[in-house]
Amino acid sequence: MLLTEYLSGIVKLIDEYSRTELIIDSELTTDFRTEKIGIIKGSITFSNNSRLIFTEYLDLRYKIEKLNYSFHYQKQDGLLIFRYDNARHRPSIDAYGHKHLPDGKVSAAEPPLLKDIFTEIMDLLL
């Protein structure tokens, strides 16, 4: 898969939700190092003014591999609702990918797909 194809899937997903008026604003930026390795960043504002800010550093040469990622969903005032990422932690946790919650808890989580993040957000919005 090429990064342009991956990006096209993201644009299509955002467009679908925008038509329902659940998304009121979105921005995407890309930094393609090759046709299969690069970074996609986005910011999406939802109808309640909550925001999803995400970054995916992808290697699509052999499979979809998220080298680094962060999906940070926050309230209008900036308070965390949830965040998925694979950043290293001190003290170390036993999971490569994990989810942060507002109460400070961190739990193991597989690298999510944007469509799954949207499903989780829609469950909170609706």
Image (spheres, rainbow, N blue to C red):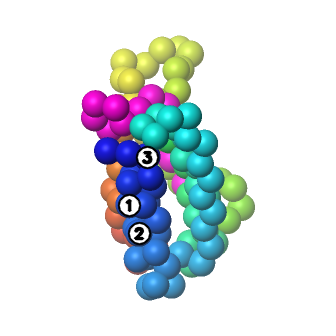
Residue at left 50%, top 35%?
A: 34
Q: Which mark is residue 89?
A: none
Question: CA gap, disc 2 to disc 3?
Answer: 14 Å
The region drawn magenta spans 59-73
Asked where in the image residue 124 lies, by quadrant, the reply is bottom left
- Any part of residue 50 in sight: no
Residue at left 53%, top 75%?
A: 23
Q: In the displayed image of the protein, which residue is found farthest to the right?
A: 77
Label 1: state its secondary structure.
helix
Q: Earlier in the sequence, mark 2 or mark 3?
A: 3
CB of mark 1 within 8 Å of CB of mark 2? Answer: yes
Q: Amino acid at mark 3?
A: Leu
For the N terminus, the quadrant is top left
Q: 36 or 68, which lies in front?
A: 36
Q: Which mark is residue 3?
A: 3
Label 3: state its secondary structure.
helix
Q: Earlier in the sequence, mark 1 or mark 3?
A: 3
Residue at left 46%, top 65%?
A: 11
Query: Which residue lies under the disc numbered 2?
Result: 12
Query: Which residue lies under the disc numbered 1?
Result: 9
Q: Amino acid at mark 1?
A: Gly
Mark 1 neighbour density, 10 Å: few (under 14) some (14–19) many (20 or more): some
**Magenta span contains residue 68:** yes
Q: 108 or 117, which lies in front?
A: 117
x%, y% of residue 12? 41, 69
Q: In the displayed image of the protein, which residue is found farthest to the bottom?
A: 20
Q: Nearer the viewer, mark 2 or mark 3?
A: 3
CB of mark 2 within 8 Å of CB of mark 3? Answer: no
Relative placement, left or right, of 64 versus 53 is left
Q: In the displayed image of the protein, which residue is found farthest to the front?
A: 35
